[in-house]
Amino acid sequence: MKLNCRAASRLISAGLDRPLSATEHVRLRMHLFLCGNCRQFSQQLGALREAARRAGQGEDGSTGE
């Protein structure tokens, strides 16, 4: 069954909190292969998560100058 963008965005978010099942993973990968908007959303969410992780560790990305 094909995913729509709403279901894909929910799986993208869920995948940050828990491991996706094999079926969820395959369905999401297929959708991301075909949908540039969801692919961009996934990349942005990953970047946001990484920035939050760094901020929590005191790494703001600045050189301290």
Image (cartoon, rainbow, N blue to C red):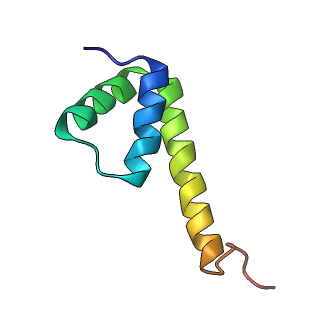
Quadrant for the C terminus in the image: bottom right
- Residue in the picture at 51% in, 43% down: 43
* Residue 55 place in picture, x, y as percent: 65, 72
* Residue 21 place in picture, x, y as percent: 22, 41
Q: Within the image, what quadrant is residue 32 found in?
A: top left
Residue placed most toward the observer, 65 or 21: 21
- Residue in the picture at 60% in, 80% down: 57
Is 55 drawn above or below residue 38 in the view shown?
Answer: below
Is 3 drawn above or below residue 40 in the view shown?
Answer: above
Q: Residue furthest left?
A: 22
Q: Residue furthest right?
A: 65
Counting the numbered discs, the total is 0
Q: Within the image, what quadrant is residue 28 found in?
A: top left
- Residue in the picture at 19% in, 32% down: 23
* Residue 3 place in picture, x, y as percent: 35, 19
Quadrant for the N terminus in the image: top left
Is 1 drawn above or below residue 9 in the view shown?
Answer: above
Left or right: 4 as drawn, with respect to 40: left
